[in-house]
Every structure is written in structure tokens, then in C-alpha cells.
Amino acid sequence: MTMRRWLRVVAALAVMALASAARAEELTITQWGVGFYGLPVAVAMDKGYFKKAGIDVTGILTAAGGGTAVRNMLASPLPYGEVALSAALAARAQGLPVVMVNVGSRSIAEFAWVTMPNSDVHSIKDLAGKKVSFTNPKSVTEMLLLMSLDAAQVPRDSVTRISSGGYGPGLTVMESGGVVAAPVVEPARTITKAKYRTVFAPKDLLAPMVITVGITTKDFAAAHPETLTAIVAGRRAGVDEVYAHPQEAARIGAKTFENLDPKVAEEAVANLHAAKLWSRGEFVKDELERMANGLRLVGELQGEVDWKALIDDRFLPADLRGLR
């Protein structure tokens, strides 16, 4: 090999290495390491599904949820994030140029309201005349509490609703007798199952609804369709793997939490697996509208939603496109 040819080979290898490094990306996932919304992403990273699809996802930017997740996504070099549907709708209402490219989770199976073991409250109907906590005003927990009361035909004004400021504080208030029931989510629900007794789970009263969606900016969608196609494809492969091998997925998911017992992760994932929490990405209008109706109930959303204007489904596989 001549010196000139050797230098060309070295240069080509350097370009390839730089290109590979440039494809190493971080995604924004709400509640990463707190809830299991992002489990398919964790599995896709572990199994190499993103690399196979054409993008090297090496890390996750997390957020406590809501607008924080959207802001983190917008500030990221790769503006893609899985965020609460409510946050995506709020961002568009504020004039931010975001579009939804896939559905993330479409079940409320992770939520439940619990009480103390010696409580005389055994069902949602027993909450009439009692004090019950939710996390924050206009939150998903306030919405689900109201929707569940309606579904069970328990008058809303018969229940005194207390905003606790969070899941942990709600349980503390309940233990001190300030309320008779408080919300929990997985995996905390499984972790504390011996300490508290379940009063009701919204999934037993309400139909599935969209909780999280994948979003990006209009500009990024126009300039980098291949990147978004790779993200959506890698995540879809992760979803399929979760449903095919939930125990292995739980093992992978446990690593995203700090000190989470793998057995707890396995039980929590089994609960969510049975409820079909994770969407492969398709947009189902009824499931979108159910969440929108709930957001209207708590004053977080006004008016109708033009879903077609919000959705850019061209990055989904052909069999998942369209508003169903």
C-alpha cells in the first residue's frame, strides 16, 4: 500500500469514527428511574435495538415530569422526548413548535389509591364523607380521582380532596390520619403492598388513555427524519421485547432505579405488562380523547384538540400510521 493510499484509508477511518461518535445521542424520558414509562427505551439500549435502527442512544436526560421534561427536550442537542401528553398539549398551547411523533404509554395501570390495613375503607364507594389525597392541583392524580369517582357514581362533593404535594407526603398524611386514602404508583405500589391496602385502582374503573407521547420540534422533524425514524423503530423493538420477555425486561429496568429489588421490578412489570401499558407508537383517537377529557375536568385543557395538527406520524412504520 502506498503512503498516499494509506493516508486515505486513515482519513476515511477517522471520518467513520467521528460520524459514529456524532450518532451517540441522549433522549429525554419523563420519570426515568422513578416510573416504568421508559422501560422499552432501557431495553432497546441494552439489546442494541437503537444501534440496529441507525442511532446510538447512550444516555437519558430525565425530568420530574410536566414542563420540565419539555424544556429539557428543547434544550437537548437531540430534541426528542417522551413526556406526559398533558405537557405536550400545554407546550402547544403556549405556542411552542412541538409535534407528537409516537405514543409512549396508554394505560393507567401504575396508579392506585391505598389505605392503612386497619382502615374501614374497603372500596371507592367507602370514600364518601372522607378525606382523600392527590398530589397537586390539575395533576393526573387529581384527574384520575375525579374520573374514578364519577365512574363509581360517588358524588365528587361527598369526598374532601386534599392536595398533598407529592406521593410521599400523601402517604405521610395518611399515616398520621389526615386522610383515609392516598395515591401510589409502580414500583412503589408493589414495594409497599404489605404496608398498605389497596382501595381502588383507576384501571378497574376507566378505559385506557394516553399518558405519555414522544415529541420533537417541527424544525428537527423537517431536518432529521432519519433520526426520528431510527428512534421510533428502536423503541418499538424495545416494546416488542418487553411483551415477549417481561422478566428479562424487568431485570434491565431494575438497573435504572437506585437499589430496586429485582423481584419487586419483576412483579411491578408483570402488573403493567398485563395492562398493556406500553404502546408500539400508534395514535388511537379514543385513548387520546379520554386523557383530554380528564384534563378538561381539572381545568388543565380548554376546548377541542386538533389532533391531526399535533401529530406527525411519518416516522412510524407504515402499519402504525394514521389516527385510528
Image (cartoon, helix red, strand yellow):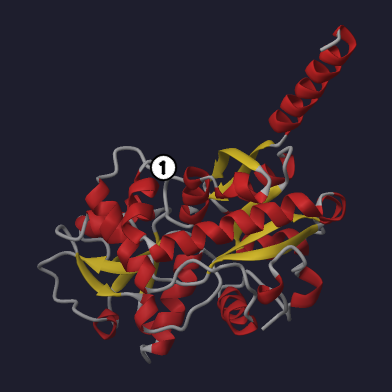
Q: Is residue 68 visible?
A: yes
Q: Would you say 302 lies left or right of 223 here?
A: left
Residue 321 x/y as whole percent: 71, 74
Which image quarter is the N terminus in?
Answer: top right
Q: Of 111 and 246, which appears nearest the observer?
A: 246
Q: Given the current orientation, which residue lies at the most extreme left position?
A: 118
Q: Would you say 167 lies left or right of 30 here?
A: left
Above or below, comparing residue 323 to residue 63 in the picture: below
Q: What residue is rendered at 71% in x and 72% in y?
A: 318
Callout 1 crowding tier (Cα within 10 Å): few <14, some 14–19, many ≥20: some
Residue 109 x/y as whole percent: 39, 70
Q: Of 186 and 43, which appears nearest the observer?
A: 43
Q: Given the current orientation, which residue lies at the most extreme front position?
A: 1
Q: Of 191 and 54, which appears nearest the observer?
A: 54
Q: Which residue is mark 1?
A: 256
Q: Given the current orientation, which residue lies at the most extreme bottom position?
A: 153
Which image quarter is the C terminus in?
Answer: bottom right
Q: Would you say 268 lies left or right of 298 here?
A: left
Query: Quarter of the image holding residue 266?
Result: bottom left
Q: Would you say 97 lies left or right of 173 here?
A: right
As helix, strand or loop, the secondary structure at mark 1 comes to: loop
Q: Is residue 172 visible?
A: no
Residue 6 x/y as whole percent: 82, 13
